[in-house]
Amino acid sequence: MPRPNKNQKAIRNRLRREDGCIQSAEVVLPDWETVELNHDQLVEQADVVRAEASCLDLISDSNTEISKRPLTYTGTSRTTKWRKNAEAAKVYPAQTLQRFGFTVAKSVETQQLTKFIPHTEKEIKGIKNSMPAVKALIAPVMSKKKDDNARASYNNARYLSVYEYCLNRLGGKKKGLASEEVAEKFWPQNSKEYRGMTITKWTKEFIDEGKLSDHSQGAHVKRVSLLSDSDVKMAVLEEIRKMKPALRSLIIIKKIIDEQIIPSVLGVAESDLSMTTIARYLYEWGYSYRKNKKTIFFDGHERQDVITYRNEWSKRMVEYMKRSEFYAGNNEEEVLEPILDEGMKQIVFVTHDESTFYANDGKDDLWLLEGENHIRKKGPGLSIMVSEFQCPCHGTMKSAGWTSRRFFKAGVGRQGSNHNVFGDDALVASRMTLNEKPYKDTEKFQFKDTTVVLTDGTRLEQSFFYTKTTSVTNRLGRQDTLKGIRKILEERGQWLGRDLECKAWKMLCKSKEPGHRSMCCARHFLESRPDFVAQKSALQQAVLDSGHSFESYPKYHCECNWIEMYWGSAKREAR
């Protein structure tokens, strides 16, 4: 039998009662009734006795705490109070308000607005909702054309881990076990506890955001560019400020950096910075490649008349393209001839446009600082206007030494809007007056006769001049030979005299565009008549008379004319 230790010896030396419970040493108290002491002596003697009693309660082991139990039981323990209160309630119950006739209204149960969902149940619900999205992300990419959409192996492993974790959770496994099993399966080289905790975070992120954040490990800068040096930056910015904005280009800036700044500042003999790097640092330093705008652009692509003409023009162009040749190959060197019926001719597109070159014209896109605005010379300066035709089989598109351009003297009243100029005998309402007026045979405009189909179906052969036998003399005694707009519409039975607001018709209203149904004024109403609408321009009439087809490009759609690319290259060289 082993020897008792120190604690066992201390317990053995304690005094015990007959029932085996440990008790403190017996304290011999004096007989207070037989001792004659005054009040002060009694208090002093009580303190001495109390101190002796406390010392007797100490255990010989110095590590044992002093008991807080009082020396004598006073019947004030918590259990005793509960027992006494229960016995008293049986004998005499407590008086309540109901015994005196009072009633206490029950509080109305408030309806729970939101159903409390435990955290685990909420997580399982989110996992179920996210499972279809995870399945779509881990599906393999089968098409070879979609290689760019294939995820990196690391991201694919992350989505697979999320998918397996969701399956384990839906199978009833707890978070720790579910995540650690996935970590051992897909990440055997990592700690399963750490990687399991990471998989749990990935799943929570996917449930909240619908995707995982991009993996950025290893994406830090591996090397520092020469342009990162502060001295190089200051030198480059100083050189750019000295340059005119119109002369700032990546080629010139690259040449200055490679040949001047880098050798002088860093002492590097040779440097070959890419223009992509230079452009990236220019954006970082506050420059941007943008247009130097100073005008307001009005977009008319969705105007109703533009939309109507654009739709009709597109259908006609599709029919023309069926009878024209196509081109294939990397450089459009292969010619694909159209399949034509017997007697059908091939259509060759010939486009035309003119462009004006100005002396003060410069680059539109410049490298400018935030808030910097390059001020050009006032006015465009001297100019030349060049007009040219282009087709696939002739001209500059076929032979570099052949030219079809013409030079014009541009100015006010010279070749202005030459595409829409009408012939001298054309039906143009703007050349007419409201009432009759004298008109000589030597006048420039001599209107041709027209045929009009009236509302009742009859055809009217109409002339815009009075014949000599039916000449009319006005009150001044002069001979009127040209009919006015009023007389022309009266002969057709279409003179209304008033607009929709019952105001008397004027020759021309203030609006440039016709009003509702072109009934705003006399001129706009006559211009809307079928024979005036069908009037062709002089250029169109000349092309049609020579046996060719004529088409005008839709307004605000200069991109349809391939000659614009030719003019763009020419102006880029000129600037």
Image (cartoon, grey):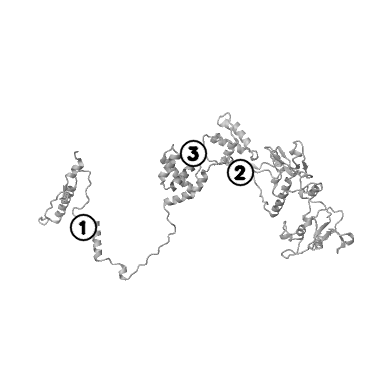
For this rendering, which residue is in front, 489 or 498?
Answer: 489
Task: Give the quadrant of the C terminus.
Answer: top right
What amino acid does circle 2 point to?
Glu
Q: Give the farthest residue toward the front.
A: 342
Left or right side of 249 for 173? left
Q: Does residue 360 appear in this view?
A: no
For this rendering, which residue is in front, 430 or 536?
Answer: 536
Q: Where residue 372 is drawn, which disc sits there?
A: 2
In percent of width and height, residue 572 lies at: 69, 40
Lower position in the chain sequence, tag 1 or tag 2: 1
In percent of width and height, residue 422 lies at: 79, 51
Q: Secondary structure at mark 3?
A: loop
Q: Which residue is mark 1?
A: 75
Lower position in the chain sequence, tag 3 or tag 2: 3
The residues bearing labels 3 and 2 have C-alpha atoms spaced at a distance of 39 Å
- Which label sits in the foreground, 1 or 2? 1
Lower position in the chain sequence, tag 3 or tag 1: 1
Residue 546, placed above or below residue 75: above
In percent of width and height, residue 229 lies at: 54, 35
Q: Where residue 217 is drawn, which disc sits there?
A: 3
What amino acid does circle 3 point to?
Gln
